[in-house]
Amino acid sequence: MDLLTKNDQRLKELHGFNRNYAETLVGYLRAHWGKDALAREDTIADLLVDMVAAQADGIASKDHFGKDPQAAADEILAELPPAPKAQWLLQLWPLFNALWVLMFVYADAIILSGETVGLDILWQQLAIPFLFIAVAPLFRGISFNQIKTKTKWRASIAVVLIIAIYAVTFLLPDTSPLTSDQLQIGLGVVVAALIVCNLGLSFWLRRLTLPWFLYWLIVGPSVRALIGATLPVALVVVLLVVFMGAVLALAIYQSKHLHFVFQAQGGKQLHVNQ
Amino acid sequence: MSKIETQMLKGTLDNAILMIIAQGETYGYALLQQLGDAGFGEITEGTVYPLLLKLQRNGWISAQRHATATGPDRKYYRITADGEAHLAEFLPQWTQLVVAMNRLIARQEG
């Protein structure tokens, strides 16, 4: 069982307000993607073990850890090592693939409906989810009971950014609609590129990229077959939803469970000061 | 026991923690209790844990996770040779400070 799963199970040992408190704290620590994930989970493990012990002694988590958990968490985070470069790839690669799946499904839906779409619309569909993911860290700290001024400022900036960039996407000049053939060729090129990238990376990060390699290898041609076949629209929609669901589950699982990188590297255990 | 001002604590708590660890291997939760018993009042883990990370980063303590007789695996902290060297430098400075403050207090009360 990996450390993240163990910590999630340990959280369940806390009850009522203790669990709410701990969940908010753990969520805040985990939202800092710039910090080494194993060091972060190791810290969370220590904090949860002690919170559970305090609970058993009748001490509330708030009294045990402190009335300003965000300030304490910030001090803890300042002491943690930065995320290694590989971790960024592990965190972002699943999202990158998932965003392209979204684009792929959207474009295929357009083709199946017989409609046309311009390149500007397609980029909009890709940019908007990317925008939400990019500004999500600015909302860190919003779930604490006492929201700090800096958190309010960051969240306000995030909202303004979302509105501004969304507005800008509508101001982009219209492009000529792409024909069905152009869309299919474009999608084919993208899928081929993703298959090659995932295959190449699988020699280094097998457990991260092999599922995506297989996904694109299976889904790409399958959807092409769907478009060529005369299947009922409802069935096609269901199949596309299933493809999307599989993607979301894979992306969420991979983004959270980084431990497998270390398992793939020979099961290196985390020892502090080694 | 009154609550000690935060700024005053900040300058001394890390060395206090180091001294407790120097007396014997310990873990986070027990450390809070040991600080309370030593007269530091109620110190929260949110205050202590960042200091433990800082002490590890400085190389003054090491941490190893191992099984306990009852309950989950815990991280135990031990002082290192560098930590002992730091304490050896710190203690005379602290003693000097205590002597100076005691003189001032005696004059104030005298």
Image: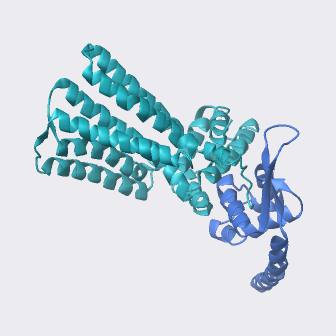
Chain colours: A cyan, B blue
Picture residue at 14% right of the left edge, 51% below the top: A172
Q: Using the image, determine if residue A61 lies above or below residue B110.
A: above
Q: Is residue A72 above or below residue B102?
A: above
In the picture, measured across the screen, residue A40 lies left or right of residue A121, that is: right
Q: How many marks?
A: 0
Q: Is residue A52 left or right of residue A124?
A: right
Place of residue A182 in the rendered image (x, y in percent of width and height, measured from the top left): 19, 38
Q: Percent x, y for residue A131?
A: 32, 48
* Rendering coords of residue B29 (x, y %): 76, 49
Q: Residue furthest top?
A: A232
Name the residue located 40 percent from the left edge and 45 percent from the top edge: A96
Measured from the top left, where is residue A265 in percent x and y?
66, 49
Along the line of sight, the residue nearer the viewer: B98 or A243? A243
The answer to whether residue A31 of the structure is visible from this angle is no
Left or right side of A257 for B40? right
Which is nearer the eye, A48 or A117?
A: A117
Q: Residue at x 66, y 51 (%)?
A: A43
In the foreground, B99 or B84: B84
The image quadrant of residue B16 is: bottom right
On the rendered image, what quadrant is the N terminus of chain A found in? Answer: top right
In this rendering, is residue A121 above or below A76?
Answer: above
Give left or right: position of A223 versus A7: left
